[in-house]
Image (tube, rainbow, N blue to C red):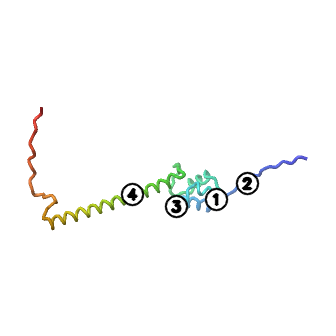
Amino acid sequence: MRTTIRVVKTHRSFTADFKRQLVKEFETGEFSVLQLSRIYGVSYQLIYNWIYKFSTFNEHGSRIVEMKDSSAAKLKEMEQRIKDLERAVGQKQIKIDYLEKMIDIAKTDLQIDIKKNYDTSQSGGSGRTGKK
């Protein structure tokens, strides 16, 4: 007697509320499609179909392309760039404050006016030089 073992494929059906909940989690940026696929055990193609069907942001006929880790890496890179720029601006502001204080000290203590006087006329220069 010979027995055969057959694998029975189960067809799961999901409610519309469940689909909308997954789409909502994706749209809020809480999870990526790949993360949702792993959490709920649903194929990512099926999740994309639900996004196209239930999403309030995506129009019919438009395509969503999501890079796996590039968006998170790009966000961290941009945050680091912002921190670096803020640090540079802070250093420049300290330098400006220091130089303004030095100008004030030079004016009060040494009676030297370092700031440019706008009412003085410009010099005529050294004149035109001839070509050889």
**Placement of 4 over or under 13, stated as above or below:** above
Kindly report the distance in space between the C-alpha atoms of the residues bearing marks 3 and 4.
28 Å
Please name the amino acid that badge 3 sits on. Thr
Q: What element does badge 1 sit on?
A: helix
Please name the amino acid that badge 2 sits on. Thr
Kindly report the distance in space between the C-alpha atoms of the residues bearing marks 4 and 1.
39 Å
The disc at residue 40 is 1
The disc at residue 10 is 2
Q: Residues within 10 Å of mark 4 (few under 14, many from 20)?
A: few
- Left or right, 123 with respect to 52, comes to left
Badges 2 and 4: C-beta atoms under 8 Å apart? no
Which is nearer the eye, 47 or 126?
126
Please name the amino acid that badge 4 sits on. Asp
Residue located farthest toward the right when viewing the structure as drawn: 1
Kindly report the distance in space between the C-alpha atoms of the residues bearing marks 1 and 3.
17 Å
Residue located farthest toward the bottom when viewing the structure as drawn: 108
Q: Can you identify the residue that label 3 sits on?
A: 28
Kindly report the distance in space between the C-alpha atoms of the residues bearing marks 2 and 4.
54 Å
Q: Residues within 10 Å of mark 1 (few under 14, many from 20)?
A: few
Q: Can you identify the residue that label 4 sits on?
A: 84
Residue at the image position 82 percent from the left and 49 percent from the top:
5
